[in-house]
Amino acid sequence: MKHLVLVGAGHAHVAAAAAVPRLVAAGADVTLVAPGPFWYSGLATGMLGGGYAAALDVIDVGAAIERGGGRSVRGTVTALVPGERTLVLATGERLSYDLLSLDVGSVVPGDVIPGAGEYGVLAKPIDRLAEVRARLEAGFARGDLVRVCVVGGGATGTELAAAVLSLARRCGGAVAVTLVGAAPRLAPGFPQPAADWLAAHLRRRGAVLRLGVGATAVVPASVRLANGEDVAADVTLVATGVRPPTLLAEAGLPCDGEGALIVDRALCCPTYPEIFGAGDCIAFAARALPRVGVYAVRQAPILVANLLAALRGEPLRDYEPQRAYLLVLNLGDGTALAVRGRRWWYGRAAFWLKDRIDRRWLAAQC
């Protein structure tokens, strides 16, 4: 038997969990190491906004691994020694592997803005958004005016602001939402007309947009801006972009400038061919991919096929990323904004499409 260790409970390893019986039949002793269950990013802001129960957003990947005949370890990998094919857990336990698959996702770094990790709530890991929802609901129930500052004017920050407005409406609560973005407009990667529409939509619902001025610090009860102003905040949500965890670069694996594991088209590390990866924590030398879940979803069947092939000594398959992808923002009011390349549209039909895609994917897992 070869020891296959899956590190992380991301999109691709959700699919791998369903394939554990096949992996075992191919000669693998399968172990998953993850700090907790999988939280689906597609429903995260909808859950924060009260449109979905928190339980709907979670998949217990460890339980699925065990049902298939594998082993699940609840824990965090603190060191990876590729030369020895060894992992070190936070408990001090050491695990050896013959094959390793990394799907550790990405994090919002708490050190980019001073105080963000200490006094703010980082948009990832996603389970913290469930805690924020409970905190906001408690404030609304007390009759408080809850002041929320969202730091980051990209797609995630925009969705977070819309979600908070939605939750306040559902609860009949009073909220003051301020979105702070260093760029002069919302969602810089979107077509200009879509970004303009999005800004007008949030303003109509009561949000205050402070664009073109970045946050320089998150402090207790406020966010400090580059122009010296302070934005009062009882809750600060930080969505200033994501990057892979530092684990991979610290292990001496070949990584890009942001710390993502460099893999070939077979999702395999050329330097250490026993190491595979998928999702936000990998990069391709020829082409950088946006860190959105759709790529991890498409990589999942290739990853599973190549793990099986590696166990059997068979040729590996190549992953071909799509050139364009559909991104749909849940605006929390029964509508959504959909963007694909330079095309965009909004309305209830866009939300219906997103809801259908998300529910179908969740229903198909494990």
Image: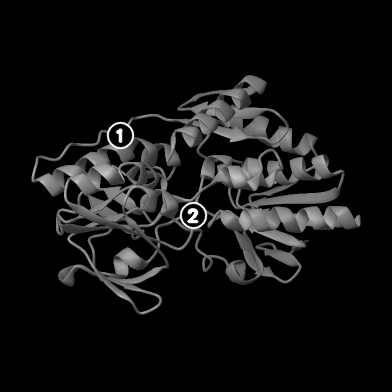
Q: Secondary structure at mark 2?
A: loop
Q: In the rendered image, is residue 51 in sight?
A: yes
Q: Is residue 154 visible?
A: no
Q: Quadrant of residue 347?
A: top right
Q: Secondary structure at mark 1?
A: loop
- How far is disc 2 from disc 1 in space, using C-alphas? 27 Å
> Residue 151 appears at what percent x and percent y?
64, 55
Q: Nearer the viewer, residue 339 or 11?
A: 11
Q: Check disc 1 and give the amino acid type.
A: Pro
Q: Nearer the viewer, residue 203 or 156?
A: 156
Q: Amino acid at mark 2?
A: Pro
Q: 16 and 290: which one is in front?
A: 16
Relative to 246, 284 lies left or right: left
Image quadrant in which the C terminus is located? top left
Camera-near label (2 vs 1) is: 2
Q: Which mark is residue 321?
A: 1
Q: Quadrant of the N terminus?
A: bottom left
For image coordinates 50% across by 36% down, the residue present is 362
Residue 3, image x, y percentages: 21, 60
Q: Residue placed farthest to the top in the image?
A: 349
Given the current orientation, which residue lies at the most extreme right position? Answer: 143
Q: Earlier in the sequence, mark 2 or mark 1?
A: 2
**Furthest residue to the bottom?**
92
- Which residue corresponds to the image point at 76% horizontal and 38% vertical from the top-left? 203
Quadrant of residue 155 in the image? Answer: top right
Q: Residue at x 20, y 45 (%)?
A: 25
Residue denoted by label 2: 37
